[in-house]
Image (cartoon, rainbow, N blue to C red):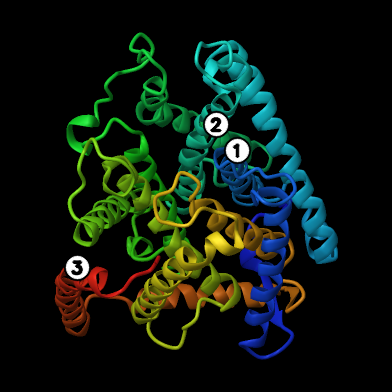
């Protein structure tokens, strides 16, 4: 039976052409060049197509991310056979697969959302329908329609990989493609639709005057505890879910959930555990802003407004994802020399430190290099767009092009695959309860509490002492 690309990522061996850190540097320089070139062509307000309006560019960026996830994680590269994946030159393979992803992206947005839903279900998916409303200009019609489409994408970018990472493709795990892919796609798309109507639809209903209370819940139910009617409250925790899924999949190696031996319990715990971690991140990052800029005040605008603060939670969260993926894709999930818990701890600390550096660097320079507006809270300042655009390019380079040219892909032998599985099993078995593990967990908990209170103390001082944007 043809397996297509099932387990292709795990069963390929990427051989470095030069010793580290040369391959990682080559990959970083190459992808940054591609990033900046494509950003100038498609996104930059000073460039050619100028899709960064910002919502039009954000819509295409977010849905392109989902296309890549669908093609690799859900459909396992179907309909391309394993032999083609292994033997085709990375440049040809990357060009073909990227072209297909863009074609599907265009058909989905223009055909499904804009034409089908926009003409026969929900008018706000179609800019032409919105321009028929009094007071809606063409610019805002396009922006509102793009906003609705990208909000759906935000949910799908969490649930689509979560079914693979947390629920392990069950109950279709052994089903051949394309049946497995279609089944997972239909279920996750259905769940995304349900979550969309419960979290984002009411946000669209309050964008128009008078509020569309016949078709949506206005004011939205979350106003009572989020201190805003904006759907940015949901954008924040959903973005945190997306980031957490990939942290679990990459630098955490699906820990600690894969320590649970019972299959159904491991999957359920992983799915809701990811949500729990995301919500903890969600509220902490909001609290961090209050420590830095003072309490949010409803009725104000921009940096003091609760709706912008919730949006900024999602923006801050995505900065953690960039270094985590770089560690996994180009640094071999370094380090690997210690025990699994210590390796994960070191990677997490590196990711946190790198995210802070990237955050500062972005806000100091993005207005010069990317064409965004200077400042934290300007309507033309959306860090999630360039960061996810860069992530998309990394996914193409890592998933479609096997990290070419600094790496060479060699299929693993059956013996190597068996050895990898045995080593992973032994690594999990080594994490068993013992007095040493108990002391380690206790020490880790104490250190975590100490770091938490240290951050609470440091953030107000840091905000008064250092100025990111002058």
Proximity of marks 1 and 3: CB atoms separated by less than 8 Å: no
Proximity of marks 1 and 2: CB atoms separated by less than 8 Å: yes
State which quarter of the image contains the C terminus.
bottom left
Q: Is residue 288 left or right of residue 165?
A: left
Q: Is residue 254 left or right of residue 54?
A: left
Residue 312 appears at what percent x and percent y? 36, 51
Q: Secondary structure at mark 2?
A: helix
Residue at label 3?
460
- The extreme bottom residue here reads 19
Vertical position of residue 321 compared to residue 441: above or below: above
Residue 17, numbered label? none
Who comes first in sequence, dot 1 or dot 2? 1
Q: Find residue 116 and report its image quarter.
A: top right
Q: Residues within 10 Å of mark 1 (few under 14, many from 20)?
A: many
Q: Is residue 384 visible?
A: yes
Residue drawn at x 15%, y 72% as measured from the top left: 457
- The extreme top residue here reads 214
Q: CA distance from mark 1 to mark 3?
A: 36 Å
Q: Nearer the viewer, residue 116 or 73?
A: 116
Residue 319 appears at what percent x and percent y? 44, 62
Q: Is residue 389 left or right of residue 210?
A: right
Vertical position of residue 187 compared to residue 65: above or below: above
Q: Secondary structure at mark 1?
A: helix
Q: Nearer the viewer, mark 1 or mark 3?
A: 3
Residue at label 2?
143
Q: Secondary structure at mark 3?
A: helix
Who comes first in sequence, dot 3 or dot 2? 2
Residue at label 1?
56
Q: CA distance from mark 1 to mark 2?
A: 7 Å
């Amino acid at each position: 039976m043809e397996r297509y690309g099932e387990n292709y990522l795990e069963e390929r061996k990427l051989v470095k052409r030069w010793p580290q850190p040369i391959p990682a540097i080559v990959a970083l320089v190459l992808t940054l060049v591609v990033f900046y070139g494509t950003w100038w062509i498609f996104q930059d307000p000073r460039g050619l197509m100028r899709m960064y309006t910002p919502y039009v560019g954000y819509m295409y960026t977010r849905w392109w991310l989902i296309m890549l996830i669908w093609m690799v994680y859900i459909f396992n590269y179907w309909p391309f056979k394993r032999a083609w994946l292994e033997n085709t030159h990375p440049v040809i393979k990357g060009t073909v697969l990227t072209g297909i992803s863009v074609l599907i992206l265009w058909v989905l947005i223009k055909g499904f959302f804009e034409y089908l839903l926009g003409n026969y279900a929900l008018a706000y998916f179609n800019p032409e329908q919105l321009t028929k409303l009094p007071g809606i200009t063409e610019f805002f019609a396009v922006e509102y329609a793009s906003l609705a489409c990208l909000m759906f994408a935000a949910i799908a970018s969490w649930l689509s990989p979560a079914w693979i990472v947390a629920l392990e493709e069950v109950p279709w795990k052994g089903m051949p493609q394309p049946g497995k892919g279609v089944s997972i796609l239909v279920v996750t798309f259905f769940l995304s639709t349900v979550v969309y109507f419960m979290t984002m639809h009411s946000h669209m209903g309050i964008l128009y005057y008078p509020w569309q209370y016949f078709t949506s819940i206005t004011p939205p139910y979350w106003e009572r505890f989020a201190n805003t009617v904006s759907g940015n409250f949901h954008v924040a925790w959903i973005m945190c879910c997306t980031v957490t899924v990939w942290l679990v999949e990459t630098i955490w190696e699906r820990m600690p959930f894969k320590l649970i031996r019972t299959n159904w319990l491991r999957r359920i715990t992983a799915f809701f555990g990811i949500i729990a971690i995301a919500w903890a991140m969600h509220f902490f990052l909001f609290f961090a802003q209050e420590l830095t800029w003072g309490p949010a005040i409803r009725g104000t605008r921009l940096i003091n407004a609760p709706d912008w603060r919730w949006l900024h939670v999602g923006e801050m969260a995505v900065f953690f994802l960039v270094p985590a993926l770089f560690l996994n894709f180009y640094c071999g999930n370094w380090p690997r020399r210690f025990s699994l818990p210590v390796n994960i701890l070191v990677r997490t600390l590196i990711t946190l430190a790198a995210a802070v550096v990237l955050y500062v660097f972005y806000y100091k320079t993005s207005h010069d290099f990317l064409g965004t507006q200077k400042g934290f809270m300007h309507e033309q300042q959306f860090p999630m767009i360039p960061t996810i655009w860069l992530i998309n390019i990394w996914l193409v380079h890592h998933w479609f092009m096997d990290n070419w040219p600094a790496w060479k892909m060699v299929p693993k032998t059956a013996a190597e695959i068996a050895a990898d599985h045995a080593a992973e099993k032994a690594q999990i078995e080594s994490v068993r309860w013992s007095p040493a593990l108990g002391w380690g967990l206790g020490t880790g908990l104490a250190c975590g509490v100490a770091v938490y209170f240290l951050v609470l103390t440091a953030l107000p001082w840091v905000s008064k002492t250092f100025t990111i944007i002058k």
